[in-house]
Structure formats: C-alpha cells, structure tokens
C-alpha cells in the first residue's frame, strides 16, 4: 500500500510515528508537505504538483496532518485527492468543520451531543447581556480557531469579561463564549477514535495555576477508562464530522460529560506516552483492513 502523510515537517512526533509504523509493516510511505503542493485545474482534469511531479494518482491512502495555520490550502489539497478516489483518513469537510469550534458545536448541538452552554456573537452593544445568558462570570472565551489550548481565556469577573470581549470584537476576532464548568477541576478527557472505535483515552490535568488542561500548555495526563456514555459521545462526534480518525475532547460536569472539541489531526505524543498504547500501529492496521 502506498501511503502519503500530509505534514508540514517530517520532524513532528506524530508524523514520524505513523511513518515508522507503516514502514515497519512493509508499506511505501511518503511525507508530503501540503504547503508545497500546487493544484492545477485545466479542461476538466486536475493535477497536484509536488516537487515537479504530478502525484494525484500515486497514493492509495492519504493521512492528513493539517494544522490550523494551513487549514484552507490543506483542505483544498485533500479535496483533490478525495475527488480522485483516494481514501482519506480525515475528509476535507471534516477538517474544515473541526477546525472551526463554532461550526463543530453547532453540528453537535443539532445532533443532541451534550456540550457546555455556548454563545457566539459579533454584537459589541450587548456584551453584558451575552455574559448573563451564560449565567454570568466566570466564563470561558475562546478563539474559534485556536489549538493546543491557545486562545482560551478564563474571565473571572464580568468586568474583565466585558473588557476582553470588547477588545476582541473591536479587532474583528471570531470568538465564542462558554459557561465555566468549575467542577471539571482543570481536567478534560481525550478519546482517540479510529473507525468507529475508541482505541485509547486519557485524562489531562492542567497546571496548578492554569485552568487549561492541554498538555501543550504544560499539563500532564494519565490513562483513564471511559464510561459507555463517553464512548458513545466520542464515536458519534467523529462520525458526524466525517472523521474516520479523530481526537474527541470532553469534560466531566454535574450534568454528565460534555463535548468541547473535536480534532481532525489529533497528536500522538501525549496520549502514547501516558497510556502506552501504540496508536500509530492501530492507525496503520485500520488502513490495512480497507478494501480498495
């Protein structure tokens, strides 16, 4: 099987792990920097040019590792491969939807997946009312396209919340507001879903003085068992976003587990280290069972 991993660098841990596992199992693997791919459209035909070569007909499988900084071009490259009949582990639509937190939450809410109370607006004239609609301060303010815990702010008072929101509105920054779930205790859960099954899960704990639980922000993690409800949330969320492979993040609250985010490019470093699960191998084994 010929596998292309779309990644901006061959030095990224997750990219390396998938490359090594696929290579170890006898597959032909190439790391393709999607930012260096040019799409040519002409007379009803398309080409993807990479380092002077048209690669659109080469791979059997594409594993996109598309970060937030390259979402649009990366998704466009993925779409061309999709339309050419190549199997993709994260569809272009799934990538675009999951990279936009507001869009993800709209879909989850419509599908009756439990989420924190959420509000997004561009109206700077009724900020106080917006905060009150979420039960007042403290509230969480998020950039709609932030990653790895960046662009997530806890506003502990109504005054500070109004100041932060007003500043973001004035700079035309897309944000969303969420209720603060105090009982989550700076912890969240990452469920790693492959082909409709949770293959690994960990709980992440933030630093003592940081409400964010993301490991990229200095938190730590450990293996955790999920409830049947949490597994169902994770599996359905990945399905609704057309993501055969996904990282689904949840927090535990007094009213049950709540989905907060779905990642189309879930990292392997933290979860493999803390759970000792060989997720890269599970990804390759899943691909081996596909019928082309």
Image (spheres, helix red, strand yellow):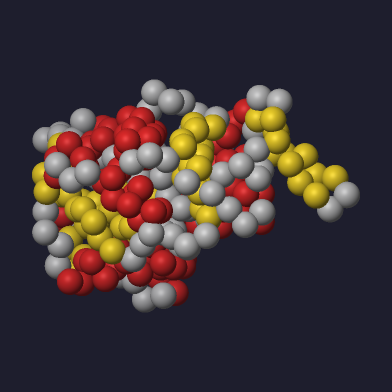
User: Residue 290: which quarter of the image?
Assistant: bottom left
Nearer to us in this view, 169 or 224: 224
User: Residue 193: which quarter of the image?
Assistant: bottom left
Q: In this rendering, would 163 be left or right of 187? A: right
Q: In this rendering, would 28 be left or right of 186? A: right
Nearer to us in this view, 65 or 209: 65
Q: Please give the name of the residue rendered at 34% of the width and 33% of the height, measured from the top-left corner.
A: 20
Is residue 224 something that shows in the picture?
Answer: yes
Q: In this rendering, would 39 be left or right of 152? A: right
Nearer to us in this view, 22 or 203: 22
Residue 142 screen position, x and y as percent: 39, 46
Residue 292 screen position, x and y as percent: 52, 60
Q: Residue furthest front?
A: 26
Is residue 122 something that shows in the picture?
Answer: no
Q: Please give the name of the residue rendered at 46% of the width and 26% of the height, measured from the top-left corner.
A: 9
Total marks shown come to: 0
The answer to whether residue 196 is above or below residue 28 is below
Residue 226 screen position, x and y as percent: 15, 62
Residue 28 screen position, x and y as percent: 46, 37
Nearer to us in this view, 185 or 108: 108
Q: Please give the name of the residue rendered at 84% of the width and 53% of the height, measured from the top-left corner.
A: 44
Q: Please give the name of the residue rendered at 47% of the width and 62% of the height, measured from the top-left corner.
A: 291
């Amino acid at each position: 099987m010929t596998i292309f991993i779309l990644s901006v660098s061959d030095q990224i841990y997750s990219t390396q792990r998938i490359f090594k596992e696929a290579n170890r199992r006898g597959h032909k693997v190439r790391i393709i920097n999607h930012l260096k791919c040019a799409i040519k459209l002409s007379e009803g035909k398309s080409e993807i040019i990479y380092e002077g070569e048209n690669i659109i007909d080469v791979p059997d499988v594409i594993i996109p590792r598309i970060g937030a900084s390259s979402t649009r071009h990366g998704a466009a490259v993925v779409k061309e491969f999709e339309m050419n009949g190549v199997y993709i582990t994260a569809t272009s639509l799934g990538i675009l939807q999951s990279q936009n937190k507001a869009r993800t939450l709209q879909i989850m809410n419509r599908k009756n997946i439990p989420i924190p109370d959420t509000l997004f607006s561009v109206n700077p004239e009724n900020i106080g009312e917006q905060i009150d609609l979420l039960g007042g301060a403290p509230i969480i303010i998020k950039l709609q396209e932030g990653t790895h815990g960046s662009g997530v702010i806890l506003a502990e008072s109504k005054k500070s919340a109004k100041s932060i929101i007003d500043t973001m509105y004035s700079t035309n920054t897309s944000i969303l507001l969420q209720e603060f779930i105090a009982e989550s205790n700076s912890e969240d859960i990452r469920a790693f879903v492959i082909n409709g099954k949770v293959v690994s899960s960990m709980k992440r704990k933030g630093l003592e003085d940081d409400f964010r639980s993301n490991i990229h922000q200095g938190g730590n993690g450990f293996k955790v068992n999920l409830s049947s409800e949490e597994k169902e949330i994770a599996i359905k969320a990945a399905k609704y976003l057309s993501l055969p492979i996904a990282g689904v993040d949840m927090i535990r609250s007094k009213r049950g587990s709540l989905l907060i985010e779905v990642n189309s490019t879930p990292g392997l470093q933290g979860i493999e280290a803390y759970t000792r699960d060989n997720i890269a191998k599970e990804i390759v084994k899943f691909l081996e069972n596909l019928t082309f």
